[in-house]
Image (cartoon, rainbow, N blue to C red):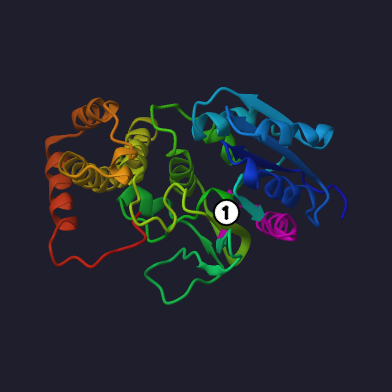
């Protein structure tokens, strides 16, 4: 193929030195040749920096002070020169033909701005497969298909569960509309914000094929964690950013805010009643009070009433547990 589009693989890392080498190697050994690898270290305190240094000029290394995932995305994107941007968490790995398949998708469909795919979940200790992520929880099974959720986002209902960081791929022109993104006190909400904005701004494509292996090791932010301590942070902060940066997405932001507020209040109640390690290390930050207050001030009276109704609906005692919340 002539005039191959350059693909930037942006790896974000924070104290994942035990996984980092496998992630970088998976990016460097793709079957597609026109690839640049940008590795951002977000102030790691383990051996991550020494591992990155060993790769020399084969990668672009960005070492910075710890400011969280959003900061890593912003700084990494500054160093990406590719036409297509693919994100990779340092504890995950790409399958060898991933970039080849992603490029084919973008080339064949010039109208799309994003391409997401499923992820294979794997226990990092045993190597055992734990299943595959699901993009359409309302359907019996996922299928490869074009997607356009712009009207859904504006209406406040997204019938799709966008995948985690390592399944996100963007055309540069779309990424430039989103990055750099605002920084907040939260350090784990950037991927949720990124994927919500992109599906609201452009049509895309979903590949029902696991092109990334997501490592499950007990310290993941939320995947397969029973305590899910970062859920309030991810929902409330994402809702606030969507509301302030993209006001046309306010209906969807309100739904996220209502769910996040429920989770936050439940977590706050537990932390006051029970002293456990899981609760003590969860993210009940004092900044939440200010952010929640500011969000309420952005809402009209009718919106406040609607948010209250949504909160009551999701707290109904007969509600069946729903794993994939939007």
Q: Which residue is mark 1?
A: 167
Quadrant showing the N terminus: bottom right
Q: Is residue 139 left or right of residue 202?
A: left
Where residue 249 appears, as percent x and y from the top left, is 35, 42
Residue 173 on the magenta span:
no
> Can I make out residue 26 in this image?
yes
Residue at the (60%, 38%) spot, across then down = 12
Residue 108 is inside the magenta segment: yes
Residue with the most extreme right position: 2
Residue 85 in view, yes or no: no
| Residue lying farthest to the bottom in this orientation | 140
Where residue 143 appears, as percent x and y from the top left, is 53, 72
The answer to which quarter of the image holds residue 313 is bottom left
At a point 30% along the width and 50% down the height, the residue shown is 156
Q: Residue 44: percent from the left, percent from the top?
A: 58, 31
Name the residue nearer the viewer: 146 or 26.
26
The part of the image, by quadrant, that contains residue 187 is top left
Taking the spot 78% from the left edge, 47% from the top edge, the residue there is 28
Q: From the viewer's perspective, tell me whether residue 103 is left or right of residue 267.
A: right
Q: Residue 60 sits in which quadrant?
A: top right
Magenta region, residue range? 94-117
- Look at the image and tell me in which quarter the C terminus lies: bottom left
């Amino acid at each position: 193929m002539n005039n191959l589009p350059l693909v930037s693989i942006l790896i974000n890392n924070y104290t994942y030195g035990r996984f980092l080498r496998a992630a970088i190697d998976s990016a460097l050994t793709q079957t597609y040749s026109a690839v640049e690898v940008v590795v951002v270290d977000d102030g790691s305190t383990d051996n991550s920096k020494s591992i990155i240094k060993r790769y020399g000029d084969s990668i672009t290394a960005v070492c910075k002070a710890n400011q969280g995932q959003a900061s890593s995305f912003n700084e990494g994107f500054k160093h990406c020169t590719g036409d297509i941007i693919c994100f990779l968490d340092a504890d995950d790995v790409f399958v060898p033909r991933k970039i080849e398949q992603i490029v084919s998708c973008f080339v064949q469909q010039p109208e799309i701005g994003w391409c997401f795919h499923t992820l294979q979940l794997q226990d990092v200790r045993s190597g055992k497969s734990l299943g595959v992520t699901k993009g359409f929880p309302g359907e019996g099974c996922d299928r490869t298909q074009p997607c356009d959720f712009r009207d859904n986002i504006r209406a406040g209902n997204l019938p799709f569960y966008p995948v985690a960081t390592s399944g996100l791929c963007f055309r540069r022109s779309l990424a430039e509309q989103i990055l750099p993104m605002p920084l907040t006190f939260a350090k784990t909400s950037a991927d949720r914000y990124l994927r919500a904005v992109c599906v609201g701004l452009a049509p895309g494509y979903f590949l029902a094929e696991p092109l990334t292996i997501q490592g499950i090791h007990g310290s993941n932010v939320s995947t397969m964690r029973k305590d899910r301590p970062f859920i309030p942070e991810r929902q409330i902060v994402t809702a606030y950013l969507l509301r302030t940066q993209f006001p046309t997405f306010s209906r969807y932001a309100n739904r996220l805010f209502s769910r996040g507020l429920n989770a936050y209040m439940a977590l706050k109640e537990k932390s006051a009643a029970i002293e456990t390690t899981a609760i003590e290390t969860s993210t009940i930050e004092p900044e939440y009070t200010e952010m929640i207050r500011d969000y309420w001030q952005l809402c009209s009276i009718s919106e406040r009433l609607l948010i209250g109704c949504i909160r009551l609906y999701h707290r109904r005692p007969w509600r069946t547990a729903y794993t994939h919340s939007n």
